[in-house]
Image (cartoon, grey):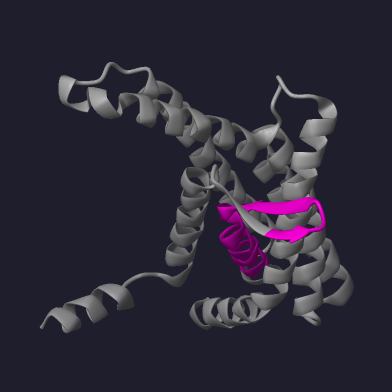
């Protein structure tokens, strides 16, 4: 009985509606969790680090490319604009929430809450700018490559647009999110470089790994169109 209800609910979900919802969900996850950085590897005296959001970001670009391929540039840009509004809402609500007075029961965890979401607010602001540049550039590059290649070489169009757009996204996001004003330029440069390079290379690698997902999503969406 329960499984029959689940199947009925799932079958009544429009594919594009689900994909857009998942896309927005990925953005929300990257906003909430992206403030944490994790060490990846040592190369001599250089420590390579990455934001945990790198697992999610290539998937966001893959979904974006799939929508562009099937529904066109205008629809993809509309989805990107929707994502930008979500990031803006998250940023504004984070600022609003941390300035509300807590109840007595919540007082012991108020400082932790403020610390987490004040950092998240900065992450959201950095992400808003980086996301705008990266996603619109991705749609633009993918569309131009589609004009050149037609429907052929989807894997080339996907990865070239992703790699270039994600570099701009990564550079802007890391710089705006993690630059520390009370530290020297050289100290900031060393730390930011340790984040930007591996973060971008990992996203590039994941973009290649997730290329089959783009093909699956494109074929999946075309069946409903």
User: Can residue 140 be seen?
Assistant: no
The residue depicted at 46 percent of the width and 44 percent of the height is 32
Q: Position of residue 79 (x, y in %)?
A: 57, 52
User: Can residue 90 be seen?
Assistant: yes
Quarter of the view holding residue 174: top right
The quadrant of the image that shows the N terminus is bottom left
Spot the residue most to the front.
44
Q: Which residues are magenta?
A: 41-68
Looking at the image, residue 158 lies above or below residue 100: below
Q: Nearer the viewer, residue 212 or 33?
A: 33
Reply yes or no: does residue 189 show up in magenta: no
Spot the residue most to the right.
148
Looking at the image, residue 217 lies above or below residue 63: below
Reply yes or no: does residue 44 show up in magenta: yes
Q: Position of residue 91 (x, y in %)?
A: 50, 31
Q: Position of residue 219 (x, y in %)?
A: 58, 83
Q: Nearer the viewer, residue 111 or 82?
A: 111
Q: Is residue 148 left or right of residue 203?
A: right
Spot the residue most to the left.
1
The residue depicted at 82 percent of the width and 36 percent of the height is 189
């Amino acid at each position: 009985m329960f499984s029959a209800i689940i199947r009925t609910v799932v079958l009544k979900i429009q594919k594009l509606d689900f994909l857009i919802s998942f896309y927005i969900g990925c953005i929300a996850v990257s906003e909430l969790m992206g403030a944490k950085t994790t060490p990846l590897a040592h190369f001599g005296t250089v420590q390579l680090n990455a934001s945990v959001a790198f697992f999610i970001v290539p998937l966001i670009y893959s979904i974006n490319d799939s929508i562009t391929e099937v529904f066109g540039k205008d629809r993809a840009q509309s989805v990107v604009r929707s994502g930008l509004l979500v990031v803006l809402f998250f940023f504004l609500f984070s600022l609003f929430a941390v300035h509300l007075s807590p109840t007595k029961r919540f007082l012991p965890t108020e400082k932790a809450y403020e610390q987490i979401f004040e950092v998240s607010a900065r992450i959201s602001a950095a992400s808003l700018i980086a996301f705008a540049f990266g996603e619109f550039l991705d749609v633009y590059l993918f569309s131009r490559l589609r004009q050149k290649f037609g429907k052929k070489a989807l894997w080339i169009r996907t990865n070239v647009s992703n790699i270039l757009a994600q570099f701009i996204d990564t550079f802007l996001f890391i710089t705006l999110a993690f630059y520390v004003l009370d530290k020297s330029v050289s100290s900031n440069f060393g730390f930011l470089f340790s984040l930007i390079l591996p973060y971008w290379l990992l996203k590039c690698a994941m973009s290649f790994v997730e290329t089959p997902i783009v093909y699956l999503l494109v074929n999946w969406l075309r069946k409903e169109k």
